[in-house]
Amino acid sequence: MAKILAIGIATLDIINLVDSYPDEDSEIRALSQSVSRGGNATNTLVVLSQLGHECHWAGVLINEPDTQLIHDDLNHYHINTSACRVLTNGKIPTSYITVSQQTGSRSIVHHRDCPEFAFTDFQQIQLDQFDWIHFEGRNIEQTKMMLEWLAAQHPDIPCSLEIEKPRTDIEILFSSPSVLMFSQDYASHHGYSDAETFLQSLPFHMTASCSWGNKGAWLSTRGKIIHSPAYPPLQVVDTLAAGDTFNAGLINGIINGLSIEQNLAQACCLAGQKCGQQGLANLTTVDV
Ligand code: ADP
């Protein structure tokens, strides 16, 4: 069991399933609605907690009624929120998601009135209690300062960085993390049509993964690139947060000292398990 801290955001996701996407200026009824907690770093922690680790989240919480659902979900998974900054004014980041049953497309309106977790907040955390620190690739300038501070003050604490969206200047974060976790979206945005060629383009010393949906994932370490196929479930039910689950699997495998081949395979297996169910409950490691 390791003590893991993740820095990032928690969101409220309000998901309306509709028969087909509404025309502008029209009114339709949703077929169903679900409300859940989202956010990459918190998703990864929810999985890591179920794999037996002590998980802490550092982010910003707004003291408003919609935050209760986020609190309840994080409490349910024993995620410690004492490192969070809590504000009285603002609005928790909220995604209003319309899913069209006809096409499967998701259209999202995102609203937030919430500052990002800052370097000065990060400096308040007693970091030497943690075995691993995971960062979301966002809030670039402040995250850069956090990574530099961590490398200077606690060079022995390993850390990972998740790079999901291509954001301006995100590359300035790549030099210090122990592991970089890239998405297909990032690689595709930079003109790569496969993960292996993308990983080959990175500097030799970087340890990096790149997941690629139902094609599985690739991992590069000291110039060696390996691949694991995906482990498809009997039926693909929900792929939202598959990448966050995969990242949790990788972190868990490194902490447990697995070989890179075993680690990549079990991370894909865990992510495949997630794709066969709604949400992130009851995920467990499996021998592959
Ligand atoms: P993201 O959620 O960031 O888009 P990916 O789609 O790359 O991430 O998925 C992460 C991992 O989840 C993949 O490497 C794969 O192992 C697994 N996965 C994703 N989609 C499927 C699928 N349709 N069937 C089986 N496994 C999947």
Image: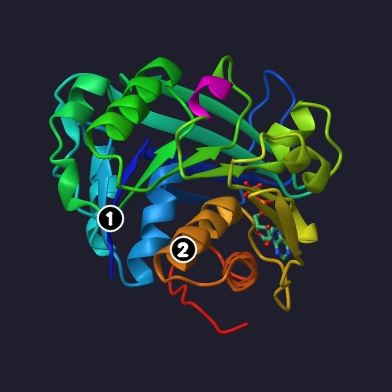
Upstream in sequence: badge 1 or badge 2: 1
The answer to whether one can see residue 177 in this image is: yes
Q: In the rendered structure, find residue 131 and report the number of the disc placed on it.
A: 1
In the depicted structure, whether residue 236 falls above or below residue 38: below
Q: In the picture, which quadrant includes the N terminus? A: bottom left
x%, y% of residue 124? Answer: 13, 30
The residue that appears at 17% across and 46% down in the rendered structure is 128
- Identify residue for label 2: 254
Camera-side residue: 52 or 198? 198
Q: How busy is the neighbourhood of tag 1: few (under 14 within 10 Å), some, or many (20 plus)?
A: some
Q: What is the span of residues highlighted in magenta in the rendered image?
A: 170-174
Give the image quadrant in which the ligand numbered 1 is located.
Answer: bottom right
Q: Main secondary structure of the magenta part?
A: helix
Q: Quadrant of residue 264?
A: bottom right
Task: Tell me, yes or no, whether the two marked residues, 1 and 2, touch with CB atoms within 8 Å.
Answer: no
x%, y% of residue 203? Answer: 66, 34
Camera-side residue: 14 or 110? 110
- Residue 172 highlighted magenta (yes or no): yes
Residue found at the very far bottom of the displayed protein: 287
The residue that appears at 55% across and 22% down in the rendered structure is 170
How far separated are the C-alphas under marks 1 and 2? 11 Å
Q: Amino acid at mark 1?
A: Asp
Q: Secondary structure at mark 1?
A: loop
* In this rendering, position of residue 135 left or right of residue 80: right
The residue that appears at 19% across and 42% down in the rendered structure is 127
* In this rendering, position of residue 175 left or right of residue 208: left
Q: How busy is the neighbourhood of tag 2: few (under 14 within 10 Å), some, or many (20 plus)?
A: some
In the depicted structure, whether residue 189 falls above or below residue 197: above
